[in-house]
Image (tube, helix red, strand yellow):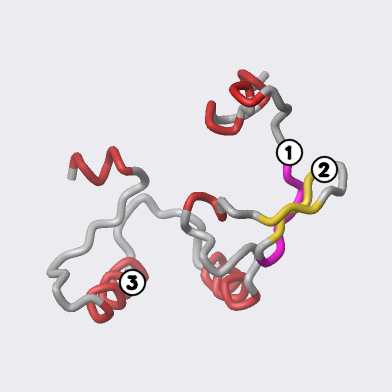
Amino acid sequence: MLPGGVNSPVRAFKAVGGQPLFIAKGEGAYMTDVDGNRYVDYVLSWGPLILGHAHPRIVRALQEAVVNGTSYGAPCPQEVELAQLVTAMMPNIEMVRFVNSGTEATMS
């Protein structure tokens, strides 16, 4: 169903002769696979999990936000608020554009 058993070639482990890990949960700096083995997550989802998995403040904020909708596909006040936070922390930034990938960023 999934080529190489994973959703991305980078997760396949084929080049190093192993089997892909299937993760059941993450907490803090750790991940636990479906077999119950615990690992330090040095990848942290390639950057966005700098506070670790399931950080209580992040979970709370998500729970509060999701009652208003999950994904709009259109601008929303929270997007403007986040852009204002970014520019307040980095005053040399004049404008912010949120994208999904490096490809989108270079095309912007």
The residue that disc 3 covers is 82
Nearer to us in this view, 67 or 24:
24
Residue 43 is situated, as x and y percent measured from the top left of the image, at 56, 51
Which secondary structure is most common in the magenta stretch? strand
Cα distance in 3D space between marks 2 and 3: 35 Å
Magenta stretch holds residue 26: yes
Question: Where residue 62 appears, x then y in whole percent?
Answer: 56, 68
The residues tagged by marks 1 and 3 sit, at their Cα atoms, a distance apart of 33 Å
The one nearer the camera, 21 or 76, is 21
Which is in the foreground here, disc 2 or disc 3? 2
- The magenta segment is 22-28
Residue 65 lies, with reference to residue 3, above or below; the image says below
**Image quadrant assignment for residue 31:** bottom right
Residue 100 in percent (x, y) is at: 36, 46
Cβ–Cβ under 8 Å for marks 2 and 1: yes
For the residue marked with disc 3, what is the amino acid? Answer: Leu
Q: Tell me what residue is drawn at x 55 percent, y 69 percent.
A: 51
Q: Would you place residue 75 above or below residue 51 in this image?
A: above
- What is the tally of numbered marks visible in this picture? 3
- Residue at mark 2 to residue at mark 1: CA–CA distance: 6 Å
Mark 2 and mark 3 residues within 8 Å of each other at the beta carbon: no
Name the image quarter holding the C terminus: top left
Q: Which residue is mark 1?
A: 22
User: SS for tag 2?
Assistant: loop
Which mark is in front, 1 or 3?
1
Residue in view at x 73 percent, y 45 percent: 23
What amino acid is at disc 2? Answer: Val
Residue 34's tag is: 2
Q: Quadrant of the N terminus?
A: top right
